[in-house]
Image (cartoon, rainbow, N blue to C red):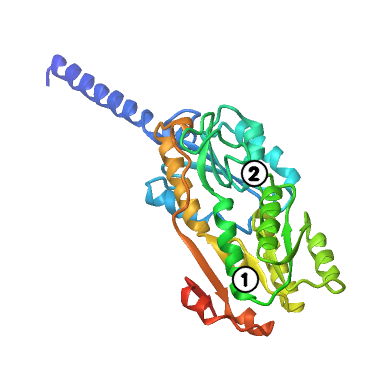
Amino acid sequence: MSLRTLRLDRIGRLSALLIAAALLLGSPSFAPAQTQAERLPKVGYLGFGASVPPTHFQNRMRELRYSEGKEVTVEYRFAGGRPGELPRLARELVDAKVDVIMAIGDEAIVAAKDATRTVPIVMVACDAVTTGFVASLARPGGNLTGVTCITSELMPKRMAVFRELLPSASRLVVLYNPENVSKPPEAARTVELAKQLGLDAKAVQFRTAEDIEHAFSAFAADRPDGLVVLTEQRSITHAKLLGDLSRRERLPVLHSFSEGVRAGGLISYGPHFPEMVLMATNYVAKILKGGKPAELPVEQPTRFELVINLKTAKEIGLTIPPSLLARADEVIE
């Protein structure tokens, strides 16, 4: 072998080694500081408590090809049933530089809205216009959009269900959380509708589990024929307690969402909550793809359900009218 050939052979091997090293250093395992996860879009999920798990959100995100850890990172923040924690948790999500915040329930929405005017927020709410969350459903404006139910349209139907369930009832109590911005006007409207049906009605506030227990204790001396619970995140958190107390006192309870009935309540009429979450998750995906909240009209749920818990009915000694059973979307036995 000539000296020239030897040199060319060495140069060839050296070039091959340099190319291999360059390819190795350029591979993901040798990438500097910033990891793949840090380059993924980031979603913040803000909820009142883990009593409403994010399962529907997670499943829908996977269907939309946003699997956690692969196509998206999700920062979860739950207040553990302590509403005072929500503002701090919302600020944490903003500081974490999330690309969009999914806020479940009015109190979480208020916290997220106060924490940022720039990060897009997707809400699952009630009465988004009445509460001032958005300017209008068609043109929300600002950094907030999502899904909302309209209680002014639902309450007459709920009260009709109550009257059909208890045709001889004369007294009604409406239980609501005054710190949820949509509930005081909803409570007032419910009392007004009840009076139009000839019922003696009053609204009772609650904030904590102790408030609920106190309210039921007071029923011993001033007993209503039925109770309407204006369902939201706090009442869902205390749904089992409400179910236990209503069965103990043999008191029929009408809930706004089926979650209360699944926890032992008697009956509910309202939007299908999982559908609302799925619709909101669709908007999260649209925003991750570049959509602007101000240009995404607030949507309303399309599925409403009447759910009856026959086991609870038997425990409290109440016969459900056949007309209600025939219309029920779900009967829990």
**Which residue appears at 66% of the width and 50% of the height?**
48
> What type is the residue that disc 2 sits on?
Ala
Question: Is 298 situated left or right of 259 in this image?
Answer: left
> What type is the residue that disc 1 sits on?
Arg
Q: Which residue is mark 1?
A: 163
**Which residue appears at 52% of the width and 68% of the height?**
306
Q: Quadrant of the C terminus?
A: bottom right
Residue 27 visible in the picture: yes
First along the sequence among labels 2 and 1: 2
Residue 251 vertical placement versus 69 (above, below): below
Residue 26 percent coordinates (x, y): 36, 28
Q: Quadrant of the N terminus?
A: top left
Question: Is 201 situated left or right of 27 in this image?
Answer: right
Front one among 314 and 80: 314
Residue 59, by quadrant, is bottom left
User: In what element is the residue under mark 2?
Assistant: helix
Residue 327 vertical placement versus 302 (above, below): below
Residue 28 percent coordinates (x, y): 39, 34
Q: Which residue is mark 2?
A: 108
Question: Which residue is outermost to the right?
Answer: 221
Residue 258 percent coordinates (x, y): 57, 65
In this view, the mark in front (2 or 1): 1
